[in-house]
Image (cartoon, helix red, strand yellow):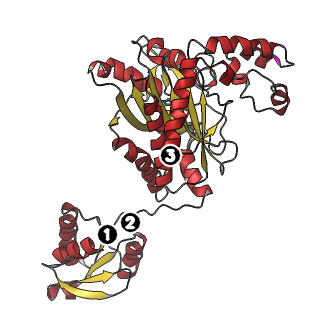
Amino acid sequence: MSTFKAPKGTYDLLPPDSATYLAVRDAIATPLRNSGYGYVETPGFENVELFARGVGESTDIVNKEMYAFTTRGGDQLALRPEGTASVLRAALEGNLHKSGNLPVKLWYSGSYYRYERPQKGRYRHFSQVGAEAIGAEDPALDAELIILADQAYRALGLKEFRILLNSLGDKECRPVYRAALQDFLRGLDLDEETRRRIDINPLRVLDDKRAEVQKQLVGAPMLRDYLCDACKDYHEQVRELLTAQGVRYEDDPKLVRGLDYYTRTTFEFVHDGLGSQSAVGGGGRYDGLSEMIGGPALPSVGWALGVDRTVLALQAEGITLDLPAATSVFAVPLGDEARRVLFAKVTELRRAGIAADFSYGGKGLKGAMKNANRSGARYAVVAGERDLAEGVVQLKDMESGEQEALAVEEFVAVLKEKLKRA
Ligand code: HAM
């Protein structure tokens, strides 16, 4: 071990487990790629103001959890705590919204940073795969995104997840509700910090996990009862579309997300095997965010799924993904002449698109075969001086244990055939 360790709240992805992470990212991205979403990549840091204005000054994410810093040049930057503000900033800067092709549908995959108190499922560096559909107000678009996330989780074999759904209203009805909620909350017996929260972000108080707070919240006004007709109708359409597609969800009138930009549809994917950090993904509509960061009105909707927690959810359900072995053929040369010949053959196999590896370091037969085994290769190709003198190599089927001699000149073609059939 070196003197250094991964920083607190972070961990490394190492083989063989890292293969599962790649597969999870891929499983989430596949339905998006298949539904008109184009790949977007933005910098790992942004102007700190983008998140302050976009995610919201009153949120924990901006107030307590952001890695903000001043560069040597005096710029105020922050490591990105989430993807939505950056992706919208990039779409606006790249004028994608002016192409006359709305909604602009984008997907992304990357690292995010929050200075949180680390625990299982909650890290300071984590990864998300996300999707944003920018510039259209259409309940079918909200439904599409929820359906695609559901499809991704199902493709991974997950069963014990639930979809929580709510509407947070819009700029017409939410202020009325907010005022009613503030009135109610001000009459309760709450601590200093929570009282401050009533002024800046009263909806978050509903989310308080403490029993003594929850007890007092019985009878609090519910946003559901304040939704304007347009919001009610919109929400009803989202619900109907999901139901018609056979996607099950639970109405959760108390679902408040930790980011300020949401309007109307909000949802969260929770997994019941994960304990307190049960949200494997979340998202919603953010019709006002573009204007909040200086852009034109662009109603939008999106989500992000947490890769780390999705992997934990797989573990909780005892699911091992059926990942193909990284290596199909493992070459074991015995002696210098065999090294030269087999190295050339391995290169040839790789150039033909066959995953092949080679025993390095001049190992003997026993050690090299151990490596061949560990590689998961279906075939090992072994050659010693005597084989080469006869113009052959030994091809060993690692599953059946059978071995056959093949002409040096022929075995690449034979392997291609065999692997095609396998
Ligand atoms: P979020 O709910 O803050 O939403 O994060 C989405 C997911 O990222 C969470 O459900 C969780 O799985 C994962 N996640 C968040 N924080 C951590 C952490 N500290 N450790 C491990 N995993 C974590 C957003 O980020 C929004 N940008 C989603 C969105 C996209 N809304 C609209 N478009």
Compared across the picture, whether 348 is left or right of 194 comes to left
Q: Is residue 69 magenta?
A: no
Specify the farthest residue to the left.
409
Please tell me which residue lies in front, 391 or 265: 265
* Residue at 17%, 66% in the rendered image: 348
Please tell me which residue lies in front, 143 or 345: 143
On the image, which quarter does residue 379 sit in? bottom left
Does the image show residue 199?
no
Amino acid type at circle 2 is Ala
The residue pinned by badge 1 equals 328
> How far from the left and from the top, in percent, is residue 150?
50, 46
Q: CA distance from mark 3 to mark 1?
A: 33 Å
> How far from the left and from the top, in percent, is residue 25?
44, 47
Q: Are marks 2 and 1 in contact (CB under 8 Å)?
A: yes
Q: Secondary structure at mark 1?
A: loop
Specify the label residue 150 is tagged with: 3
Amino acid type at circle 1 is Ser
The residue pinned by badge 2 equals 325
Q: Secondary structure at mark 2?
A: loop
* Residue at 66%, 52% in the rendered image: 273
Compared across the picture, whether 181 is left or right of 278 comes to right
Q: Secondary structure at mark 3?
A: helix
Ligand 1's quadrant is top right
Q: Residues within 10 Å of mark 1 (few under 14, many from 20)?
A: many
> How far from the left and from the top, in percent, is residue 38?
32, 35
Amino acid type at circle 3 is Asp
Q: Compared to 102, does 12 lie above or below?
A: below
Part of the protein shown in magenta: 187-193
